[in-house]
Image (tube, rainbow, N blue to C red):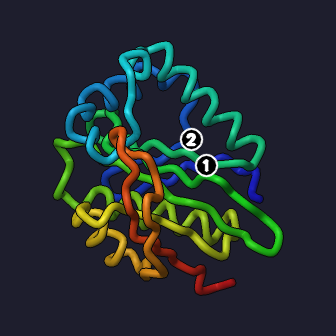
Amino acid sequence: MSSKVPRIVTARTEITVPTAADGGALRAFVVANRERLARWEPLRDDSYFTVDACRERAADAWLQFERGNAIHLLAWDLASSRILAQCSFTHLIRGVFDACFLGFAVDGESEGSGIMHEVLEAAIGYMFDEVALHRIMANYMPANLRSERLLTRLGFEREGYGRSYLKIAGRWEDHILTSRLNPSS
């Protein structure tokens, strides 16, 4: 895996791996989007939204990057220096699989602006070109039509249906299973 720390610049963002110093900005993002994202995420208690917990998650994201286990990215607004989106490439498995899972979230104020597409297009390019992955998998709940449209636009193809796949908002939820293959691998 590339040991080079990503600094990806798009038309509107700079995308980087978080550090503990980003804990305050990460907290602002998760607090601002808490209610809107709750139906798509695991149950979270109040401790998840503290600045200390956000600092710990950001520091852990850095460690996971250094170990090659995952690459968590924050997309910073070039104009305001606030977080517009985040994406995570987790459960990175090398060898004969060379694959990972993608998760993502966009700030409510930016939803519908195309920013998530811009960020993911650049981040996926990094994962294919620099990290040299073969496959990125992304799964979404059938009711999440925005994620379905976004993933389709990004070239993800449906591969299956996972019954009771993840426990989201306190309930086991079905998911559509998709992936995108690296055309260069």
Density class for disc 1 (Cα within 10 Å; few <14, some 14-19, many ≥20) is: many
Q: Quadrant of residue 46?
A: top left
Q: Which mark is residue 71?
A: 1
Q: Are marks 1 and 2 in contact (CB under 8 Å)?
A: yes
Q: Nearer the viewer, residue 7 or 147?
A: 147
Q: Position of residue 131 (x, y in %)?
A: 69, 63
Which residue: 69% across, 84% down? 185
Q: How many marks?
A: 2
Above or below: residue 2 compared with residue 48: below
Q: Position of residue 90 (x, y in %)?
A: 60, 52
Inter-mark Cα distance, 1 to 2: 7 Å
Left or right: where does residue 160 sit relative to residue 126?
A: left
Left or right: where does residue 12 sit relative to residue 3?
A: left
Left or right: where does residue 27 sit relative to residue 35?
A: right
Which residue: 48% across, 81% down? 159
Q: Position of residue 47 (x, y in %)?
A: 42, 16
Instruction: Report the amino acid beneath label 1.
Output: Ile
Q: Which residue is mark 2?
A: 17
Which residue: 47% across, 78% down? 160
Q: Nearer the viewer, mark 1 or mark 2?
A: 1
Instruction: Report the amino acid beneath label 2.
Output: Val
Numbered disc 2: secondary structure: loop
Which residue: 55% across, 29% down? 58
Numbered disc 1: secondary structure: strand
Q: Which mark is residue 46?
A: none
